[in-house]
Amino acid sequence: MLDAFFRIHDFLVEHSFMPIRRKLMDEIDWNDRLIAIKGGRGVGKTDFLLSRAKEIEQEWRNRPVEKTRRRSKKRDARPCLYVNLNDFYFTENTLVDFAGLFVKAGGTYLFLDQVFKYPNWSRELRRCYSKYKTLHVVFCATPVLPIEEENADIKDIAKTYNLRGFSFREYLNLQTGLRFRSYTLEEILQRHASISREICERVHPLDYFKNYLHHGYYPSYLESKSFEAALLKVMNSQLEVDVLMIKQIDVACLHKLRKLLYILMREAPCALNISNISDEIGLSRATTMNYVKYLKDSRLINLLYLEDKSFPMKPTKAFIHNTNLAQMIFTREIPTIDLYETFFYNAIHGGHKVNATERNAMFVVDGKYYFDVRVDTPQRDAIRPTAVGEQETGRGNLIPLWLLGFLY
């Protein structure tokens, strides 16, 4: 029975495509026995799993062979297996029993995709963790799946990591064949002038930055098909599956969700007038705020709050999650400053806390770094860190905006 799954596994691993090594690959402790890879749709979670499976199998093939005539069955066992849980096999067979067959055959790493389509997935992952002490399970998860919540079955045993779309650094490496490393925010704040000069001696980042803002966040831009069509499919899947199905919202409300997202795309970055939006889409204020939260959880939008505020309070500002999504509305010309602010928030918030501030600054990061974002380089130096979109190298408090795309 496992042979059929291994045939699918072998085909997918052979045809998987991850053109660069994602930074997250080296940040995960692969010794943990239950690992969740969370990420929005379209960022490459499946290829990430398959790439890790390929690495394990290469290590397995290159292992030293014992000089003995007798080879144990376990010695010849395949070490890992990728399985999609929407396979019809799981309509009448349990994940726990399947994992048992895999372990009995000598398997160690089980990579699971589409876990949300399997009933009681978190409960069975808990049983696998308790029952099979040698088994390592790695599974993909949409951002809205409850893993860290108090009532989750696996909150105390699962190690959760977030896979994001390509950073500008990753995009630049892909386009140029270079291998620039990432930098911490503190390194950029302290040494942005020298770092940016070193990079610009090898490449001109601004020659690539506009294209990244348009299509560089999602790996699908590497495929020959229409990027806009692929991204539209991703957005609809986020609405129809990540929000409607997982949050168990009536399908009749899909049109209202789509209209809410359209309104936000039409206006963002913007303050939220919940009363007006509620009237426009025909929902109560409370339901509208819940839907806004669902869009945020599914990584279609970002919400900016003051430091002491959070949901269910109204945010100070709403942003589209990334600049690629922001340009998927064709009824408006997006101001450049709006794109730059959207990029800033998306680049920073993955590893840092980003808030609005009552001071004159646009953003406060980690409660201590106050930032402005500008399009053009001012004649005088700024009084606080300022990310400048059209500036190639740094000086004083003026930081090239593109360099913040080197945080991961």
Image: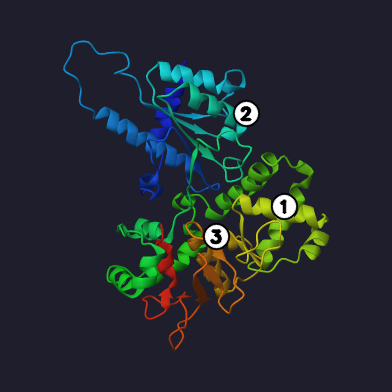
Within-10-Å neighbours for mark 1: few <14, some 14–19, many 20+: some
Residue for badge 2: 120
- What type is the residue that disc 2 sits on? Asn
Q: Are marks 3 and 1 in contact (CB under 8 Å)?
A: no
Residue for badge 1: 291
- What type is the residue that disc 3 sits on? Asn
Image quadrant holding the C terminus, namely bottom left
**In front here: 398 or 225?**
398
Q: Position of residue 346 (x, y in %)?
A: 52, 61
Q: Which mark is residue 384?
A: none
**In front here: 157 or 27?**
157
Q: Is residue 263 left or right of residue 216?
A: right
- What type is the residue that disc 1 sits on? Tyr
The relative height of residue 94 versus residue 44 in the rendered view (above or below) is above
Give the mark, 3 or 2, whose residue is nearer the N terminus. 2
Residue for badge 3: 322
Q: Position of residue 109 (x, y in %)?
A: 41, 29
The relative height of residue 262 versus residue 243 in the rendered view (above or below) is below
Q: Secondary structure at mark 1?
A: helix
